[in-house]
Amino acid sequence: MNDRGQVLGEMLSSNPALNGAFVWDPRTGVHVLRVPLDATTQPVALTATGQALVNVPVGDAPSRTGRAVLWTPPIHRTAWAH
Protein backbone atom coordinates (compact mmCIF):
# COMPACT_ATOMS: atom_id res chain seq x y z
CA MET A 1 0.00 0.00 0.00
CA ASN A 2 1.38 3.43 -0.81
CA ASP A 3 1.64 6.26 1.70
CA ARG A 4 -1.40 8.05 0.30
CA GLY A 5 -3.54 4.93 0.62
CA GLN A 6 -2.28 4.31 4.13
CA VAL A 7 -3.00 7.87 5.23
CA LEU A 8 -6.49 7.76 3.71
CA GLY A 9 -7.11 4.44 5.45
CA GLU A 10 -6.06 5.89 8.79
CA MET A 11 -8.16 8.97 8.12
CA LEU A 12 -11.29 6.92 7.48
CA SER A 13 -10.74 4.62 10.45
CA SER A 14 -10.19 7.55 12.82
CA ASN A 15 -13.18 9.52 11.51
CA PRO A 16 -16.11 7.25 10.61
CA ALA A 17 -18.09 10.26 9.37
CA LEU A 18 -15.79 10.34 6.35
CA ASN A 19 -16.45 6.70 5.49
CA GLY A 20 -17.56 6.41 1.90
CA ALA A 21 -16.71 10.04 1.25
CA PHE A 22 -13.58 9.25 -0.76
CA VAL A 23 -13.57 7.70 -4.20
CA TRP A 24 -10.65 6.85 -6.46
CA ASP A 25 -10.58 8.89 -9.66
CA PRO A 26 -8.69 6.84 -12.27
CA ARG A 27 -8.54 9.81 -14.66
CA THR A 28 -6.45 11.90 -12.30
CA GLY A 29 -4.91 9.12 -10.23
CA VAL A 30 -5.90 10.69 -6.91
CA HIS A 31 -8.52 10.13 -4.28
CA VAL A 32 -11.32 12.67 -4.42
CA LEU A 33 -13.92 13.75 -1.91
CA ARG A 34 -17.55 13.61 -2.94
CA VAL A 35 -19.31 16.93 -2.45
CA PRO A 36 -22.95 16.02 -1.86
CA LEU A 37 -24.41 19.45 -2.57
CA ASP A 38 -23.61 19.49 -6.27
CA ALA A 39 -22.49 15.89 -6.87
CA THR A 40 -19.05 17.04 -8.00
CA THR A 41 -15.79 15.76 -6.60
CA GLN A 42 -12.91 17.62 -5.02
CA PRO A 43 -9.32 16.38 -5.07
CA VAL A 44 -7.84 15.58 -1.70
CA ALA A 45 -4.33 16.87 -1.10
CA LEU A 46 -2.13 15.32 1.56
CA THR A 47 0.46 17.55 3.18
CA ALA A 48 3.91 16.42 4.24
CA THR A 49 2.62 16.09 7.81
CA GLY A 50 -0.26 13.87 6.71
CA GLN A 51 -3.06 16.39 6.92
CA ALA A 52 -5.77 15.93 4.33
CA LEU A 53 -6.88 19.14 2.67
CA VAL A 54 -9.76 19.83 0.34
CA ASN A 55 -11.01 22.97 -1.38
CA VAL A 56 -14.43 24.01 -0.12
CA PRO A 57 -16.73 26.71 -1.54
CA VAL A 58 -16.75 30.05 0.26
CA GLY A 59 -19.94 32.08 0.12
CA ASP A 60 -22.18 32.05 -2.93
CA ALA A 61 -19.46 32.40 -5.56
CA PRO A 62 -18.36 28.95 -6.78
CA SER A 63 -15.04 30.38 -7.91
CA ARG A 64 -14.12 31.37 -4.35
CA THR A 65 -12.78 28.46 -2.36
CA GLY A 66 -11.03 27.98 0.93
CA ARG A 67 -8.93 25.13 2.25
CA ALA A 68 -10.40 22.80 4.85
CA VAL A 69 -8.39 20.37 6.92
CA LEU A 70 -10.33 17.11 6.86
CA TRP A 71 -8.01 15.13 9.06
CA THR A 72 -4.91 15.71 11.13
CA PRO A 73 -2.78 12.75 12.20
CA PRO A 74 -2.67 12.07 15.94
CA ILE A 75 0.33 13.52 17.74
CA HIS A 76 2.55 10.80 19.14
CA ARG A 77 4.29 12.20 22.20
CA THR A 78 7.63 10.70 23.07
CA ALA A 79 9.15 10.94 26.52
CA TRP A 80 12.72 12.11 26.22
CA ALA A 81 15.23 11.02 28.85
CA HIS A 82 17.51 13.83 29.98
Image (cartoon, rainbow, N blue to C red):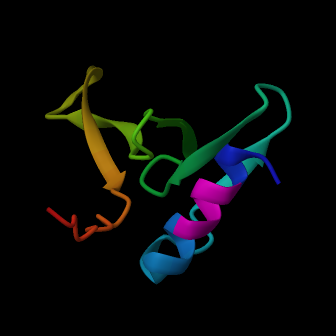
In the displayed structure, does residue 74 sit left or right of residue 13? left
User: How many marks on residues?
Assistant: 0
In the displayed structure, does residue 64 sit left or right of residue 15? left
Q: Position of residue 79 (x, y in %)?
A: 23, 71
Q: Position of residue 74 (x, y in %)?
A: 34, 67
Q: Which residue is rendered at x = 66% and y = 45% of the image?
A: 4
Question: Which portion, as a residue range, is magenta?
Answer: 6-10
Q: Which residue is rendered at x = 38% and y = 60% of the image?
A: 73
Predominant SS of the magenta segment: helix
Pick the residue in front: 78 or 33: 78
In the displayed structure, does residue 82 sit left or right of residue 74? left
Residue 70: quadrant of the picture: bottom left
In the displayed structure, does residue 31 sit left or right of residue 77? right
Q: Which residue is rendered at x = 45% and y = 78% of the image?
A: 14
Pick the residue in front: 46 or 64: 46
Figure quadrant of the C terminus: bottom left
